[in-house]
Amino acid sequence: MNNPNTYDFPEEFAENDELMQILENGTIKEKEHALLNIALGGHNSEDVLDLFLYYTADPELEAIAFMCIDKFLENYRHYPLTKILWLLIDGLTNAQESIRYHCQGGLDNLVSPTKLKEETLSFESFQIDFKYDNLAPYLASDSAEEIIIALLYLFYHPHKDEELFKIVDEQLAKNITAVNCIAGAIIDAKLSDILEMINAVGELSLVSYNHAKASGLKSKASWVYDRFDSMRELAREHMKVMLAERQEVK
């Protein structure tokens, strides 16, 4: 577990006089703005994480540091995940609601970053020395960190959805909070794919469909009839959940 008690202030940022002036003498808002700008990109990812980890030990800036880690995971596409994964896991039980919120957001961003960029995430993005032989023992573990790494490995490598969902169900049965977050993010990402497929089918005109079927689509047409209803039902259930969440927010 990568969990040292203290962190040194990164030298890259210590040499920035303007930044140091703000971090040492600025208002809370000025410090928040400066740290958020760093979270948006353009710096060495390990130095950035060290900076935010440094401020998680500062009571005045702790919540801001967690928010910045969430934003970092939204914007960066290459970083040493194990440096902060333990923190996201532990933060889910923090007494401060805002910290719990940003730890959940950070875990979500490991699967589906909300910030759209040309460069997408891959398992290699996380800079983890992990091999296929590690998969079974990690999935059999009760360690949230090991299970999450294994699930991310499965998600980002070629897989069959039914096999992935079976493994996700098995991990959900362990009822580990952080694992549940990652499992939920994976399921949500897959549901989004299903909704896109349904929208694509909706764009198909009846004339085009009939022409395609007449040209030999018969075997594939059966897939549409067999699967479309179940996909649409799943989408309806997903929309119910989304509407319920919106009402709770109100």
Image (spheres, rainbow, N blue to C red):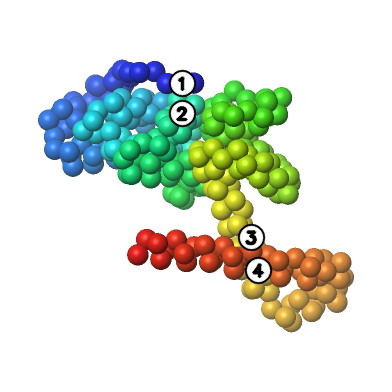
Alpha carbon of mark 3 to alpha carbon of mark 2: how far? 32 Å
Question: Pointers 2 and 1 in contact (CB under 8 A)?
Answer: yes
Q: Given the image, on which type of amino acid does mark 4 rest?
A: Arg
Residue count near mark 2 (Cα–Cα under 10 Å), binned few <14, some 14–19, many ≥20: some
Residue assigned mark 2: 86
At 32% from the left edge and 18% from the top edge, which residue is drawn?
6
Which circle's residue, 2 or 1, is located before the other in the chain? 1
Q: Reading the chain from its start, which is encountered first: label 1 or label 3?
A: 1
- Element class at badge 2: helix
Q: Residues within 10 Å of mark 1 (few under 14, many from 20)?
A: few
Q: Residue at x 31, y 29 (%)?
A: 56
Residue placed under numbered mark 1 in the picture: 2
Identity of the residue drawn at 21% across and 33% down: 60
Q: Residue furthest bottom?
A: 207
Q: Which residue is mark 3?
A: 194
Question: In whole angstroms, how far apart are the C-alphas of marks 3 and 4?
Answer: 9 Å
Left or right of 168? Residue 60 is left
Q: Please state which of the two labelled residues, at mark 3 or mark 4, is closer to the viewer.
A: 4
Up-down: is 205 above or below 17? below
Can see residue 157?
Answer: yes
What amino acid is found at the position of numbered circle 3 in the picture?
A: Ile
Which is in the foreground here, disc 3 or disc 2? 2
- Secondary structure of the residue carrying numbered label 1: loop
Q: Amino acid at mark 2?
A: Trp
